[in-house]
Image: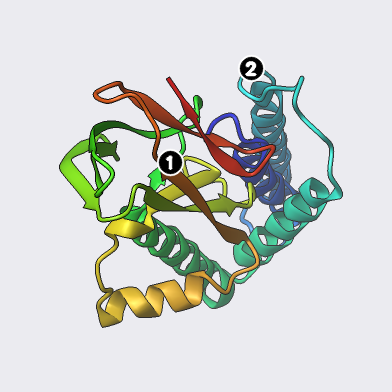
């Protein structure tokens, strides 16, 4: 998450909005307008300095060698700036509802992601061992999500696993990973709450999902194989 530039743009835009709000605040009704004017300049400088510190600190965490500039960063910063600037002006009309909505969004997405697992940097989705393959069927020991299923068995000579891969837009900076997966073969029937959450989340333009299938067959018995996500060729490959 800290390697995501949006993570640093968000607080920088919030403090920049606070600084501009301080600068534009009225001092007419203050007991000491001169001192109040001095204080608002001080708070403006502090907030703007903090905003610049967040942007500067991102250089230590964001991999700039892989960074590609997009106008979306500008749009995101402007939207955050405007929303929080208005929330500082209209604290009860916009400010409190905005904080509530943001907290609800974070909670909502994290609830949805409970059944998903982030794809690790090595892109290994799991491993398996073929226990038997006698022509009448195949049995395998499968390890996915850091848990081991004793074995799975198919009457045919192949076992087909279907993984669902979800790509998340990086603007959802509060999510730990930008790529998640789950094994569709092991999915249980969703209850009504999960169906509602799925219906809402799956229709957002900030994420996309795609199915990847992999066939486990014609492998050496009892040898450990890894299932690795190839994000460039958009398939799952088997590595030993």
Q: Residue at x 29, y 78 (%)?
A: 193
Q: Secondary structure at mark 2?
A: helix
Q: Residue at x 44, y 58 (%)?
A: 106
- Percent position (x, y) of residue 208? 60, 60
* Residue 215 visible within the image: yes
Is 120 on the left or on the right of 224, as rendered?
right
Disc on res. 198? none
Is 45 on the left or on the right of 147, as rendered?
right
**168 to 203, vertically: above or below:** above
Which residue lies most toward the left here? 150
- Percent position (x, y) of residue 222? 24, 23
- Percent position (x, y) of residue 94? 58, 73
Q: Residue at x 28, y 44 (%)?
A: 135
Please give the residue where the numbered disc 1 appears in the rendered image.
118
Nearer to me, 207 or 126: 126
- Percent position (x, y) of residue 63? 68, 22
Quarter of the figure with residue 192: bottom left
- Asked whether the beta carbons under mark 1 and mark 2 sit within 8 Å of each other, the answer is no
Q: Secondary structure at mark 1?
A: strand
Q: Residue at x 44, y 51 (%)?
A: 163
Q: Earlier in the sequence, mark 1 or mark 2?
A: 2
**112 to 130, vertically: above or below:** below
Is 80 on the left or on the right of 143, as rendered?
right
Q: Give the mark count.
A: 2
Q: Quadrant of the C terminus?
A: top left
Q: Nearer the viewer, mark 1 or mark 2?
A: 1
Disc on res. 60? 2
Q: CA distance from mark 1 to mark 2?
A: 23 Å
């Amino acid at each position: 998450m800290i390697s995501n530039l949006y993570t640093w743009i968000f607080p920088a835009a919030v403090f920049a909005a606070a600084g501009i709000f301080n600068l534009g605040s009225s001092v007419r009704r203050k007991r000491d307008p001169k001192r109040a004017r001095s204080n608002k300049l001080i708070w403006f400088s502090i907030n703007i300095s903090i905003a610049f510190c967040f942007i500067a600190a991102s250089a230590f965490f964001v991999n700039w060698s892989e960074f590609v500039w997009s106008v979306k960063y500008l749009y995101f910063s402007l939207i955050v700036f405007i929303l929080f600037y208005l929330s500082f002006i209209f604290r009860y009309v916009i400010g409190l509802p905005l904080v509530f909505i943001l907290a609800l969004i974070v909670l909502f997405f994290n609830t949805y992601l409970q059944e998903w697992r982030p794809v690790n940097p090595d892109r290994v989705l799991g491993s398996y061992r073929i226990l038997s393959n006698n022509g009448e069927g195949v049995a395998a020991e499968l390890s996915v999500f850091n848990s081991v299923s004793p074995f799975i068995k198919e009457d045919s000579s192949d076992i087909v696993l279907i993984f669902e891969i979800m790509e998340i837009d990086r603007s959802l900076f509060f999510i730990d990973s930008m790529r998640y997966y789950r094994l569709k073969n092991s999915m249980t029937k969703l209850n009504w709450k999960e169906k509602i959450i799925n219906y809402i989340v799956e229709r957002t333009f900030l994420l996309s999902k795609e199915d990847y299938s992999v066939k486990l067959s014609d492998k050496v018995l009892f040898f450990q194989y890894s299932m690795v996500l190839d994000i460039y060729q958009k398939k799952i490959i088997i590595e030993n």
